[in-house]
Amino acid sequence: TEVVVMVDADTVLKEDAIEKILPALSDGETLSACGFVLPQKRRTFWEKVRHIQYLYFIGLPKNTQNFWGVLLISSGCFSAYNTKMLKEMGGFPEGTIVEDMILTWQGHLTQKKIKLVPQAICYPKDPENWRQYKAQMLRWNRGFLQAISIFGFKLLKNPKLAFFSWWYLVSGILNLFLWILLFGYLAWMLWQKTYFVRPLYLFFFGMIFEAMIVLIVIIVNGKKTGTLKEALLNYPLYWFIAPIDSYLFFLSLWKEWIRGQKLVVWEKGH
């Protein structure tokens, strides 16, 4: 057929998802289009965390990338591809844990369009417990690091792609540094039995500003997806998981780049 639709085995599509996503490929210049993602179940702590993360990270960062025409990834759980273009590019690449991201970047570097269609919704089965969540985050992070290693300065052929991909890397390292600094300072205050909080003001002001942005995005996308009430109830989980995600990013850096232990086994966890 003219279009190939890739759907993960554990993913369910909304009834109109395919008819919503197909028009994005009609211009003959688009390699791939992906949809909005919502957890299939939202019962456990980790599923609720993922719900909030999808609403925010697809709602703002990924929509921003879409606006500038440089999605970092056409989500593997549900994407539609122009069959002819896919064949011309040799199909899905091998040698990494994130063939969907590699193919997306190859598309950008060969002047092909990659789009996000928020109206096309899919429901994957997301992590139910810590073990599954950790496995998924390590796979995503280490796959991203593998992509960076493969493309390197070739990304400069598309300055926008270089900016967003390298910014994701730099922001991950900066977030890690800030959390280490915060917890280190709090530990120092407890050790010294002092409560000199003035140096923390800038950090807290930054968090308050970010909290407002995250809340607005979650409200907007929660309303669009019909999950507003759940989103408001689960909003605080965003802040609980942030330092944990920074730790997992560090663990990914440590294993993939510092230790040189390339991840080659794809583990879903469930």
Image (tube, rainbow, N blue to C red):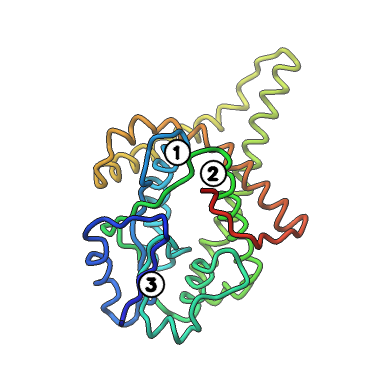
Badge 1 local density, few (<14 within 10 Å), some, or many (20+)?
A: many
Type of amino acid at the residue the image marks with label 3: Ser
| Residue 8, image x, y percentages | 42, 61
**Whole-Å distance between the Cαs marked 2 and 1?**
10 Å
| Residue 136, image x, y percentages | 55, 50
Q: Nearer the viewer, residue 101 or 170?
A: 101
**Whole-Å distance between the Cαs marked 3 and 2?**
27 Å
Type of amino acid at the residue the image marks with label 2: Tyr
- Earlier in the chain: of badge 3 and badge 2, it is 3
Q: Which mark is residue 36?
A: none
- Earlier in the chain: of badge 2 and badge 1, it is 1
Q: Residue at x 68, y 52 (%)?
A: 253
Label pair 2/1, CB-CB below 8 angstroms:
yes
* In this picture, residue 134 sits left or right of residue 92: right
Q: Which quadrant of the figure contains the N terminus?
A: bottom left
The residue beneath circle 3 is: 32
The residue beneath circle 1 is: 49
The residue beneath circle 2 is: 133
